[in-house]
Image (cartoon, rainbow, N blue to C red):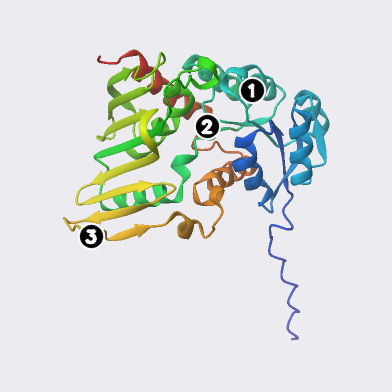
Amino acid sequence: MAKAKKGKKAKKATAATVQKLRVAFIGAGSRAVSAHYPSIHEMRDAEICAVAELNEERLERVTKQYRIKGAYTNYQKMIETERPDVVYAIMPPQHLYDTAATVMDMGCSLIVEKPPSITSEQTRQMAIIARRQKVVTGVTTQRRFAPVIRTGKEACEAVGPVHTAEAAFVKYTPAGAGPTYRGAVDLLTVDGIHAVDTLRYLCGGEVEAVASDVRRVGAEHQTLFLAMVRFSSGATGFLKFGYKMGRRIFSVESHSDGISFYGDPEEGGRLFTDGNVEPSKLLDAFKLSRSQKTHRAYGAFAMNRHFIDCIREGRQPETNFEDALKGMELVEEILHHAQI
């Protein structure tokens, strides 16, 4: 009997054969252009199909730079016309809620900048709308996605559970400098949320107890935020966030039994084990990301890659609105229960 002819091998699916996700942006400010536009632009399975921006100069600049066909000044018209798979709304939090609610009510999945709102109640309502509309959501708290922080935490957990962690985000501001957005949002909510989210990521579990100290140092608005947080995982976390320090630095610590990680998503990290004074391993952000581009080395690309994968697979990202609510609630615990 003659052997049956072998059928042709099916072509393996590649990024070129996968239908590209259509991504639309609301906003073309510095944060969006430095982190999110380049991340999406570099993905072979996603494309920026349109931008809505009120500033015509910004709109022209970004559409030309990234060769984006759709340019709008009305985001609702953009969504109705372009039918994107996901919308990124990158704008100050005091202007976000109505836009976010409208985008979700139009049936679009949504990614927003940190913080996701002004209050935990606003975040809760956003999460409720997302559940009702069955859309995927995400908040761009990128530090937890930074290769240095990700690798350091995983190295500690490979030995045992994290028992102690710290997230410190400190900055220098000169005398007389006013609050962000003219005081529309406190500094911990608008900026310190990065450190709060990272501390939650490092410790794991749910918040059980909070003790904090919040002060006005060198200004008429709150500039120093210190906290100790006990988590259900058994870990204790320490938060240090302030605007009246000597320089800007974002640093973390993570400790398990016999191993310690000290790191900065931008400046690198060190692992120490078994009492040795020399690090057992050095972590370089650029080597870990295999790139010299800062949006890759510092976590923005990995975060956005995670978002796009989740949109494609119909699952919620790590930093969805439900999770972001927990971060906002911790922020308010720190603000409202300060032991002064």
Which residue is pictured at 29% across the width and 44% down the height? 254
Q: Which quadrant of the figure contains the N terminus?
A: bottom right
Element assignment for label 3: loop
In the figure, 272 relative to 6: above or below? Answer: above
Q: Which mark is residue 100?
A: 1
Element assignment for label 2: loop
- Left or right relative to 25: residue 200: left
Three-letter amino acid code at the position of disc 2 = Asn
Few, some or many C-alpha atoms within 10 Å of disc 3 (few <14, some 14-19, many ≥20)? few
Q: Position of residue 305 (x, y in %)?
A: 58, 47
How far apart, in angstroms, are the residues tagged by discs 2 and 1? Answer: 13 Å
Circle 2 is placed at which residue position?
320
How far apart, in angstroms, are the residues tagged by discs 3 and 2? Answer: 39 Å
Give the residue at the far front of this rendering: 175
Element assignment for label 1: helix
How far apart, in angstroms, are the residues tagged by discs 1 and 3? Answer: 49 Å
Q: Position of residue 326 (x, y in %)?
A: 42, 25
- Camera-near label (3 vs 2) is 3
- State the residue in front, 240 or 45: 240
Three-letter amino acid code at the position of disc 3 = Glu
Give the residue at the far bottom of this rendering: 1
Quadrant in which residue 309 is drawn: top right
Quadrant in which residue 242 is drawn: top left
Circle 3 is placed at which residue position?
278
- Camera-near label (2 vs 1) is 1
- State the residue in front, 23 or 335: 335
Three-letter amino acid code at the position of disc 1 = Ala
